[in-house]
Image (cartoon, rainbow, N blue to C red):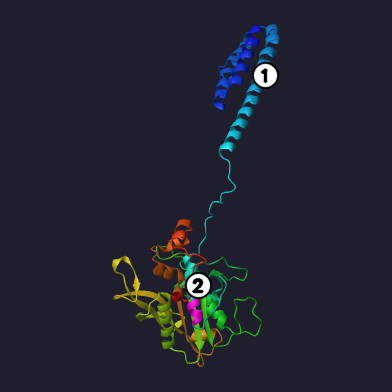
Amino acid sequence: MTDLSQLEADLSAQIAAAGDLSALEAVRVAALGKTGSVSALLKTLGAMSPDERKERGPQINGLRDRATALIAERKAALEAAALDAQLAAERLDLTLPAPPRRKGGVHPTMQVMDEMVAIFAEMGFSVAEGPDIEDDFHNFTALNFPPKHPAREMHDTFFFHPGEDGERKLLRTHTSPVQVRTMQRTNTPPPAPWIAGGQEPPIRVIVPGRTYRKDSDQTHTPMFHQVEGLVIDKGVHMGHLKWTLETFIARFFETDSVVTRFRPHHFPFTEPSAEMDVGCDRSGGELRIGQGSDWLEILGCGMVHPNVLRACGVDPDVYQGFAFGMGVDRLAMLKYGMPDLRDLFAGDGRWLSHYGFSAFADPNPASGLS
């Protein structure tokens, strides 16, 4: 009994003298670890007679329990002291200003789209919008796409599973369906604000929005942004189209020396159709619009096909029109020097802090913003 009393006194003194958690842990291991002093006593119980075990067992187990309780108590005291010291060392000075918060920015795509809308608004265009999920009629048939046109196939268009009526909805491949909805005439109120129904010519709208195609590389993404334009009136011709686009390019790229050329092309929904190039200079690793002897394709355009006018309830013998479409993301790349289209959709905050725009920046009159 005298040995147990002395061992308990020694352990109590060592526990009380432990100045930090690591020292206390060393005391615990020395006493209660696998080879500790108290653990060694517990191992001797198996070799004792029943009477000795009955007498010594409670004494040794009691010593173990009391040592465990003392260690836990000392550990709580040391942890409280450590926390008090940490709080004293890391005291917060409430008189100091708060750390600066990270500022958001306007995405280049949205900046460019706003610039384009502002420029066309000055030329008398209004904005029309439509649904991202379309049907075959508005996305293809009304736009004079033949039944077996490649754009209808799965390799180009995102189709949904057929509905109960067998029709497959799709993610629109261009914003042209909104032009169809704008031209369609109906005597019933439109069920949604994006259906312009009942609007009679003259029509002058631009259609900004998201579009979707199965394509992904340095200059293509499955989801991208377009701005399309539509003008329907009496006596409209290619000269009006040329002036509209040249005026836009000059304002958008902030230059008066714009040189353009129109190359014959084919689009199902326009006739004649053309692709528009602008003169540029690519020397020195920079792109300069209105300089040099190189050419850069900017957009597609043409006179609205008579079949499209008929499908939308417009008499092609009375009204003519032109349409054009351009990629917002590509124009952002050209104007602000972005090398990879995919970066616009990567969601990297560092990229946005470099290429983004302040929401409170002064307007740029040259870009058409005011």
Is residue 59 found left or right of 301 in the rendered image? right
The percent position of residue 272, horizontal first and vertical second, equals 41, 85
Which quadrant would the N terminus be assigned to in this image?
A: top right
Is residue 18 found left or right of 189 in the rendered image? left
The percent position of residue 199, horizontal first and vertical second, equals 59, 85
Asked whether residue 286 is drawn in magenta, I would say no
In the depicted structure, whether residue 107 falls above or below residue 40: below
- From where the camera sits, is residue 153 visible? no
In the depicted structure, whether residue 215 falls above or below residue 126: above
- From where the camera sits, is residue 27 visible? yes
Disc 2 packing (10 Å; few <14; some 14–19; many ≥20): some
The percent position of residue 76, horizontal first and vertical second, equals 64, 29
Residue beneath disc 1: 66
Task: Name the residue nearer the viewer: 58 or 169.
Answer: 58
Residue 326's label in the rendered image is none
Callout 2: SS: helix
Provide the residue span drawn in magenta.
Answer: 118-122
Disc 1 packing (10 Å; few <14; some 14–19; many ≥20): some
Kindly report the secondary structure that dominates the magenta region of the rendered protein.
helix
Task: Name the residue nearer the viewer: 108 or 357.
Answer: 357
Q: Amino acid at mark 1?
A: Arg
Residue 114's label in the rendered image is 2
Asked whether residue 119 is drawn in magenta, I would say yes
**What residue sits 64% from the left and 11% below the top?**
45
Callout 1: SS: helix
Task: Name the residue nearer the viewer: 352 or 339.
Answer: 352
Q: Amino acid at mark 2?
A: Asp
Tags 1 and 2 in contact by the CB under 8 Å rule? no
